[in-house]
Image (cartoon, rainbow, N blue to C red):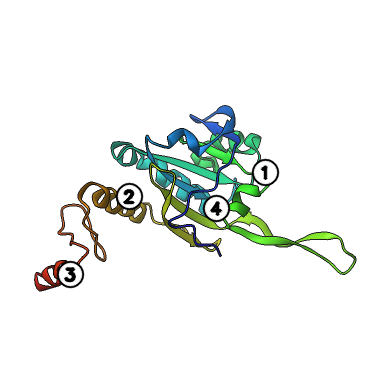
């Protein structure tokens, strides 16, 4: 599993569905560089059970992301038509109607592969034929990307394990606090709590208060 932290997020152009039902060609995260932080997350498949809980949970807290000037973008290996259909299915029927942030279509699986979250890989069998070993879907990868396009945080969960939107917001707050103040954020730091200078003196001062 690749660690992309500290590296530029892989570039891509792909079909996406935005604003709950509009098709966009050549959607790219580059549109946010210099303007917004980005939370880019992968989920395995449309029309499944854990996925809508995550996708709806991000939508329910979009106000909190927007006030932090953070774009949220989802991605799976489904087609744009599948995304569109799911976005237009009511929640009580297993759909995600009401979700407005972009959902990217990674039908070729190249985005998942470039972010190294594909749950399997292409290989050759004994006859020299190319086969796919594993599940051809994305793990639940999440990447926090800064305004320079650099990955600053990543977490990858196995398929059954949903992620925490609260923890994602905490990581956004920690990154933005560091960018604005130059201080580092200790374990379980939350906005309003004391941070510390990245020096031995700063660590000692912080620990003496706790």
**Sequence order check, earlier mark of 3 and 1:** 1
The N terminus lies in quadrant: bottom right
Q: Say which residue label 1 marks.
A: 107
Q: Position of residue 117 (x, y in %)?
A: 57, 57
Which sits in the foreground, 195 or 157? 195
* Circle number at residue 199: none
User: In the picture shown, does residue 113 fall above or below 120?
Assistant: above
Q: Describe the element under mark 2 as helix, strand or loop.
A: helix
Disc 1 versus disc 4: distance between alpha carbons? 20 Å
Q: Describe the element under mark 4 as helix, strand or loop.
A: loop
**Sequence order check, earlier mark of 1 and 4:** 4
Q: Describe the element under mark 1 as helix, strand or loop.
A: loop
Q: Where is residue 171 in the image (x, y as percent from the top left)?
A: 33, 54
Q: How many labels does the image show?
A: 4
Which sits in the foreground, 119 or 154? 154
Q: Where is residue 209 in the image (x, y as percent from the top left)?
A: 9, 69
Q: Nearer the viewer, mark 1 or mark 4?
A: 1
Q: Residue at x 37, y 37 (%)?
A: 36
Could you tell me if residue 11 is visible in this image? Answer: yes
User: In the picture shown, does residue 196 fall above or below 26?
Assistant: below
Disc 3 versus disc 4: distance between alpha carbons? 44 Å
Q: Which residue is drawn at 15% across and 59% down?
A: 194
Asked if marks 3 and 2 touch (Cβ < 8 Å), the reply is no
Q: Nearer the viewer, mark 3 or mark 2?
A: 3
Residue count near mark 2 (Cα–Cα under 10 Å), binned few <14, some 14–19, many ≥20? many
Q: Say which residue label 3 marks.
A: 203
Q: Nearer the viewer, mark 4 or mark 2?
A: 2
Q: Say which residue label 2 marks.
A: 172
Disc 2 versus disc 1: distance between alpha carbons? 29 Å
């Amino acid at each position: 599993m690749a660690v992309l932290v500290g590296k530029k997020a892989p570039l891509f152009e792909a079909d996406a569905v935005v604003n709950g039902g509009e098709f966009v060609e050549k959607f790219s995260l580059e549109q946010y560089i210099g303007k917004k932080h980005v939370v880019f997350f992968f989920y395995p498949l449309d029309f499944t059970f854990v996925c809508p809980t995550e996708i709806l949970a991000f939508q329910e807290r979009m106000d909190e992301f927007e006030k932090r000037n953070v774009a949220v973008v989802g991605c799976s290996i489904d087609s744009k038509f599948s995304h569109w259909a799911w976005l237009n299915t009511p929640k009580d029927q297993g759909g995600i109607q009401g979700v407005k942030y972009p959902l990217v279509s990674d039908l070729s699986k190249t985005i998942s592969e470039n972010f190294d979250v594909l749950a399997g890989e292409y290989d050759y069998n004994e006859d020299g034929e190319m086969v796919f070993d594993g599940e051809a879907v994305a793990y639940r990868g999440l990447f926090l990307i800064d305004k320079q396009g650099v990955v600053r945080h990543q977490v990858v969960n196995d398929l059954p394990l949903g992620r925490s939107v609260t923890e994602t917001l905490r990581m956004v707050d920690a990154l933005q606090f560091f960018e604005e103040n130059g201080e580092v954020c200790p374990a379980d730091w939350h906005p309003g709590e004391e941070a510390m200078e990245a020096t031995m003196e700063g660590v000692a001062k912080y620990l003496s208060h706790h």
